Image (cartoon, rainbow, N blue to C red):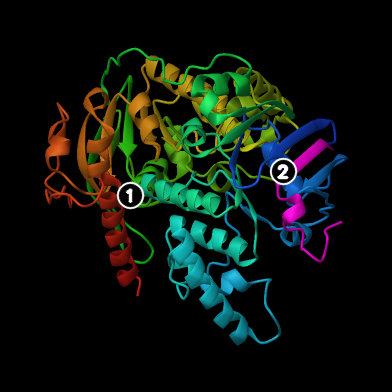
């Protein structure tokens, strides 16, 4: 058990021991062996990456360490001491903090209230809040964790919400921080700021475990990296002694192509035509400000932009989830923008398939079986009918075929969606939509939270659909994905199109400027591009990096929206 005299923290005798050592950890969920005889050592004052395909057992292993699950076998040592961790409170007492991919914050509470929640010093909140305010000020100075302590969580950007999660752990005196896919929803500027925070924490002697599927991040920030595959630990190497290609092969068990392999597009007829599309949200804020857009058969058009600049609203209107004004035609025929014929069912009947941005909230019903999820939206298809009733056997057989083709693991149509990893949940959604042979595929964040092997597979399926002469509209916050998968790129900022042009002449600097609403010399260098008059030509402050300039413009936009919201 944890030594109560030290709270499980390191002392002088244990200073050379690993911060964390796991021995023989095994965990099964029924017939699925999530972890098998795992051994890992994480040294103090280091950033240790853990990578692996979705379903490899990374999150299960960290959930055992944080007390969410109890291992079937094995031992946990914290700073050299054998430690029982029956629950998360025991993990916190042992000096472990965890920042989850989906934050555990109360949105209508302030930053201060979230920080002290569950760690109050007594029945009166005022002393706890006063103490927390002082501690947060000190932590902000030490680690660049600046955030307004009185701000409501719901009014903060995703990056600032993540800082609150880190502050919560540090307020509880965590020496060990576990971060699960921490950059999945961050802007490039926010991700860079997070890395500076992690580096500061490492310099102060904190130990960081970073779970991520992004090999660039592993190479940039970690000291050591462990690779998991199918529930087993396959390798632990020093980051400086490896490279992305080797890590990808260790993860997947074969060589992986780290770029999209595709031929040049041969665009055909104009499938989708959007003119003067405008959308207001339920608060009256204009989210789309007169969008004009074309997508042709046999091409992939990528929408680049920082999340929250109108891309989601564009997909929602096209997919029948939201109303708008303007004109949209599909194959030359108009689509309704309001009324009963503007819904998702009507869109599917017209040949539009949609992979939504949030698979768990919009693409799946987590407590339903895989075979049910694989038919959702298409359950009225005649092949799924048997007289007046739905033919469940036909749905199951069709799902089993999709599971095999798309390599969904475990290959079991009778598991509920919540029992699949994020990447395999995504494969179920992608299979459902692509296998309908649509004229137009709308795909939002196709590989968010997805491992390198599944990314390669999903990209191949999207390119294959393009090569069949279908039109694809792609939205992604991953610039690398936009650049490598798209044939043409459209950049959006604050509900407007800043510029568009061929992917082959785009570069990250120019795209970064347009994503912040900036034009100028960096964008003019992209041959064949059309830059909108809406893109400000104001010069970037020479004392700031491009990332800082982009971040500043985005925060200005957030401030404007906050003022509109009162």
- Left/right placement of residue 533 relative to residue 514 reads left
Q: What secondary structure is found at the residue carrying circle 2?
A: loop
Residue extending farthest to the front is 12
- Asked if marks 2 and 1 touch (Cβ < 8 Å), the reply is no
Residue bearing mark 1: 310
Residue 117, position as x, y percentages in the image: 64, 72
| The C terminus lies in quadrant | bottom left
Q: How many C-alpha atoms fall within 10 Å of the one at disc 1: few (<14), some, or many (≥20)?
A: many
Residue 446, position as x, y percentages in the image: 47, 34
Residue at 56% in and 23% down: 247
Q: Residue 50 lies in what quarter of the image?
A: top right
> Which residue is more in the foreground, 200 or 421?
200
Residue 46, position as x, y percentages in the image: 59, 43
The stretch of residues the image draws in magenta is 1-28
Residue at 27% in and 41% down: 512
Q: Is residue 545 visible?
A: yes
- Left/right placement of residue 519 relative to residue 219 reads left
Q: How many C-alpha atoms fall within 10 Å of the one at disc 2: few (<14), some, or many (≥20)?
A: many
Q: Does the magenta portion include 431?
A: no
Residue 445, position as x, y percentages in the image: 45, 38
Residues at marks 2 and 1, CA–CA distance in whole angstroms = 47 Å
Disc ID at residue 18: 2
């Amino acid at each position: 058990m944890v030594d109560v005299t030290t709270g499980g923290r390191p002392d002088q005798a244990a200073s050379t021991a690993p911060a964390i050592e796991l021995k023989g950890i095994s965990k099964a969920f029924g017939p699925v062996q999530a972890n098998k005889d795992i051994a890992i050592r994480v040294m103090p004052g280091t950033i240790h990456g853990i990578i692996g395909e979705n379903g490899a057992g990374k999150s299960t292993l960290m959930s055992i360490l944080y007390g969410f699950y109890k291992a079937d076998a094995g031992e946990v040592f914290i700073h050299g001491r054998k430690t029982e961790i029956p629950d998360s409170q025991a993990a916190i007492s042992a000096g472990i903090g965890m920042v989850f991919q989906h934050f555990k914050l109360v949105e209508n509470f302030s930053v201060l209230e979230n920080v002290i929640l569950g760690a109050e010093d007594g029945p009166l909140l005022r002393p706890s809040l006063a103490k927390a305010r002082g501690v947060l000020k000190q932590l902000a100075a030490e680690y660049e964790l600046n955030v307004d302590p009185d701000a409501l969580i719901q009014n903060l950007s995703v990056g600032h919400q993540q800082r609150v999660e880190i502050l919560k752990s540090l307020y509880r005196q965590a020496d060990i921080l576990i971060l699960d896919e921490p950059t999945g929803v961050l802007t490039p500027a926010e991700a860079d700021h997070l890395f500076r925070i992690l580096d500061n924490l490492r310099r102060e002697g904190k130990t960081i475990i970073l779970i991520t599927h992004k090999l660039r991040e592993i190479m940039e920030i970690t000291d050591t990296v462990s690779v998991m595959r199918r529930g087993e630990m396959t390798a632990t190497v020093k980051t400086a002694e490896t490279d992305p290609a080797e890590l990808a092969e260790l993860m997947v068990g074969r060589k992986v192509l780290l770029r999209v392999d595709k031929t040049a597009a041969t665009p055909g007829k104009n499938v989708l035509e959007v003119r003067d599309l405008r959308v207001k949200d339920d608060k009256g804020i204009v989210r789309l400000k007169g969008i004009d857009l074309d997508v042709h058969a046999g091409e992939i058009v990528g929408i680049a932009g920082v999340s929250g600049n109108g891309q989601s609203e564009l997909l929602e209107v096209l997919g029948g989830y939201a109303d708008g004004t303007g004109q949209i035609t599909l194959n030359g025929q108009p689509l309704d923008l309001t009324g009963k014929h503007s819904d998702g069912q009507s869109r599917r009947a017209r040949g539009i398939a949609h992979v939504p941005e949030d698979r768990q909230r919009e693409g799946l019903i987590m407590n339903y079986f895989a075979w049910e999820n694989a038919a959702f939206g298409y359950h009225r298809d005649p092949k799924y009918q048997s007289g007046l009733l739905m033919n469940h056997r036909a749905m199951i057989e069709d799902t089993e075929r999709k599971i095999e083709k798309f390599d969904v693991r475990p290959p079991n149509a009778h598991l509920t969606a919540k029992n699949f990893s994020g990447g395999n949940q995504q494969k179920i959604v992608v299979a459902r939509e692509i296998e309908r042979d649509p004229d137009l595929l709308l795909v939002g964040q196709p590989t968010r939270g997805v491992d390198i092997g599944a990314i390669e597979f999903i990209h191949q399926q999207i390119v294959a659909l393009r090569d069949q002469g279908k039109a694809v509209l792609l939205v992604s916050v991953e610039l690398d994905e936009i650049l490598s998968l798209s044939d043409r790129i459209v950049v959006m900022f604050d509900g407007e199109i800043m510029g568009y042009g061929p992917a082959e002449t785009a570069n990250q600097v120019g795209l970064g400027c347009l994503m912040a609403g900036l034009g100028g010399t960096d964008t003019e260098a992209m041959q064949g591009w059309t830059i909108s008059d809406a893109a400000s030509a104001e010069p970037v402050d020479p004392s700031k990096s491009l990332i800082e300039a982009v971040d500043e413009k985005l925060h200005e936009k957030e401030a404007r929206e906050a003022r509109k919201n009162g």
